[in-house]
């Protein structure tokens, strides 16, 4: 059958990899929304938004690095992959 994948175990890894960028964007967007609320509620100018933006970046990248290290361990020969 044309276009049929020969390695069905890689679908879960590809789905996880595609979802990582979405998780990073959601972390940043969620923290920015909290920062906007803080700025409006406490009249603190752009400081709440800026601080929350950087917190979202730090948390999002931490999650990204943690997930990619787990993903790379599963795809390495002799890693945690139960199929190997």
Image (tube, rainbow, N blue to C red):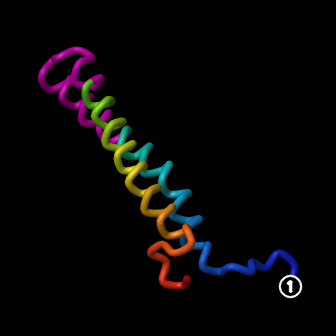
The answer to which of 5 and 81 lies nearer the viewer is 81
Residue under the image location 44 percent in, 75 percent down: 80
Residue under the image location 87 percent in, 79 percent down: 2
Q: Quadrant of residue 4?
A: bottom right
The answer to which of 14 and 44 lies nearer the viewer is 14
Instruction: Give the percent coordinates (x, y) of residue 6.
Output: 74, 80
- Residue hosting label 1: 1
Residue under the image location 41 percent in, 49 percent down: 65
| Most distant residue in the top direction | 45
Magenta residues, start to end: 29-50
Indicate whether residue 67 is drawn in magenta: no
Instruction: Give the percent coordinates (x, y) of residue 14.
Output: 59, 65
Q: Quadrant of residue 57?
A: top left
Indicate whether residue 31 is drawn in magenta: yes
Question: Which secondary structure class fits the magenta region best?
Answer: helix
Residue under the image location 28 percent in, 34 percent down: 55
Element under disc 1: loop
Q: Indicate whether 7 appears above or below 66.
A: below
Is residue 66 shown left or right of residue 84?
A: left
Is residue 47 shown left or right of residue 13?
A: left
Q: Indicate whether 43 appears above or below 59.
A: above
Is residue 57 shown left or right of residue 35?
A: right
Q: Quadrant of the C terminus?
A: bottom right
| Most distant residue in the left direction | 42
The answer to which of 1 and 68 lies nearer the viewer is 68
Instruction: Give the percent coordinates (x, y) of residue 12.
Output: 55, 72
Instruction: Give the percent coordinates (x, y) of residue 44.
Output: 17, 17
């Amino acid at each position: 059958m044309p276009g049929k994948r020969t390695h069905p175990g890689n679908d879960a890894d590809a789905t996880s990899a595609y979802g990582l960028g979405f998780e990073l964007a959601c972390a940043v967007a969620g923290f920015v929304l909290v920062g906007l609320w803080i700025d409006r509620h406490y009249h603190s100018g752009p400081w709440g938004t800026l601080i929350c933006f950087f917190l979202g970046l730090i948390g999002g990248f931490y999650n990204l690095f943690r997930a990619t290290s787990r993903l790379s361990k599963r795809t390495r020969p002799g890693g945690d992959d139960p199929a190997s």
